[in-house]
Amino acid sequence: MTEKVAKLREMAELEERYAVSYDDDVAGLGNVAVAGLMMGVALDSRKHAGLYRAIAAILEGPLGITDVEYDRLEAALKRHVEVEVGMLSEARALLEGVEDDRAKRLLEEIVDDEVRHHKFLSNLLEAVLARDMIFEQDVWDMIWRDVPTHGAPRDPYAPGE
């Protein structure tokens, strides 16, 4: 195992520990809003752990997928793309009806996440339908190609926002 792969795996474990720590910190917290926000950070930490593991696997060598896995993945992706379309529509509808700036900011984050999820899943489904071998660059393109913020939250103080 290379030093970089070892570091990636270490970071994955660190993110997992942080997620558990967040869970412990919000247990029994009476403020539902603060607890919900902290749980969101905990989920992001779990996501980061998974991404670190994925990067480590990519760096360790070529990744393949069998025909059976393609079929299973195709069915799952089609289902999830449909779900994301519905979730995006609902989140946008909620955003339009909210006046409170704090709630609006959180709904904007949700809409942004749903847009990223939909584009990512649609791009991945496109690759699966083409039965293309999914390589590292394909994964990076699927994640970032259509994302203007590249995963960073929008700056609430930037002009025009």
Image (spheres, rainbow, N blue to C red):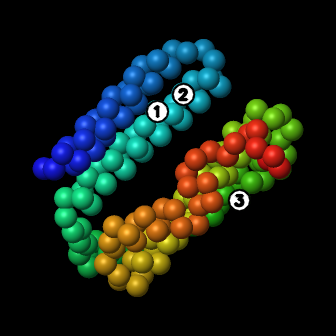
Task: Judge the density around disc 1: few (<14), some (14-19), many (≥20) Cα neighbours within 10 Å.
Answer: many
Give SS at disc 1.
helix
Give SS at disc 2.
helix
Residue 52 placement (x, y as % from top left):
33, 47
Say which amino acid is labelled 3.
Ser
On screen, residue 161 versus residue 127, left or right, reads right
Task: Judge the density around disc 3: few (<14), some (14-19), many (≥20) Cα neighbours within 10 Å.
Answer: some
Residue 89 placement (x, y as % from top left):
71, 59
Q: Is residue 83 visible?
A: no
* Mark 1 or 3, nearer chain start: 1
Q: Is residue 151 visible?
A: yes
Say which amino acid is labelled 2.
Met
Look at the numbered discs 2 and 1 and tell me whether their residues touch, using CB distance below 8 Å: yes
Look at the numbered discs 3 and 2 and tell me whether their residues touch, using CB distance below 8 Å: no
Pointer 2 residue = 38
Q: Residue at x 32, y 32 (%)?
A: 14
What's the mark number on residue 42?
A: 1
Q: Nearer the viewer, residue 131 or 142?
A: 142
* Mark 3 or 2, nearer chain start: 2
Give SS at disc 3.
helix
Q: Residue at x 50, y 72 (%)?
A: 123
Please name which of the two marks, 3 or 2, marks the residue nearer to the observer: 2
Placement of 76 over or under 105, stated as above or below? below
Pointer 3 residue = 89
What's the mark number on residue 102?
A: none
